[in-house]
Image (spheres, rainbow, N blue to C red):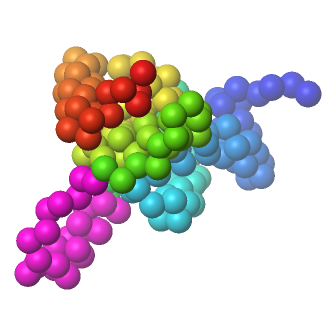
Amino acid sequence: MIKLTDTEIIESVKRGNQSDFSILIDRHKNKAFSLLKRMLKNEMEAEEVLQDCYLKAYKALSNFKGEAKFSTWFYRIVYNTALTRLSTKKRKIEIEMASIDDHNYLTSDFDIHPGEKDAMVKLVNNLINKLPQKNAAVISLFYLDGMSCEEIGEIMKLTANNVKILLYRSRNILKDIIVENNLVEELR
């Protein structure tokens, strides 16, 4: 089987082979879903938003000019859709919770069993999930998805230098969370 490039698949879809879009979905769904889970902190909501992203990307595919890689273009759609969802959700929560002053969102109830890889992965994911959305996104894209600062910059509409600054600050926030929760030994 010949492995087609994203550009070749996009051209095929533009020519009317709509089913080829599923190939693009299969290639990019895991990273997109991972980013959404980190930003939205809810798996079911991430699945719902991912479906919206597929629809948006499909409808906008005719406008894709190929100036950036398809993955960068698609992740920008994912990132912006997540930000929109978070903004809407935040406004709704602010209205519903206007009289509540509970800001205690950091907890230290991690289920850690030394020596277990699953526990370590869960701990790291919990720590990343404690970061503000933009910080969690940049950490996830850089370390977990292996994207360059330039690619992240295109997705988040930042310069590569601003991405580096955001990464630096995100690592410091993550370090502070680790120290505050006395987790330095668990992460060695």
Q: Position of residue 125 (x, y in %)?
A: 44, 42
The reply, left or right, for residue 98 in relation to residue 183 is: left
**Magenta highlight range:** 85-107
The quadrant in which the C terminus is found is top left
Q: Position of residue 55 (x, y in %)?
A: 56, 59
Name the residue at 23% across, 22% down: 168
- 39 falls in the magenta region: no
Query: Does the rendering let one see residue 86?
Result: yes
Name the residue at 41% across, 30% down: 186
Q: Is residue 186 above or below residue 42?
A: above
- 87 falls in the magenta region: yes
The residue sitting at the right extreme is: 1
Q: Position of residue 97 (x, y in %)?
A: 16, 78
The reply, left or right, for residue 73 in relation to residue 54 is: left
Query: Does the rendering let one see residue 170?
Result: no
Q: Position of residue 96 (x, y in %)?
A: 20, 82
Q: Is residue 34 above or below residue 101?
A: above
Between 9 and 178, the one lying in front of the other is 178
- When asked about the image quadrant of residue 159, the answer is top left
Name the residue at 31% across, 50% down: 108
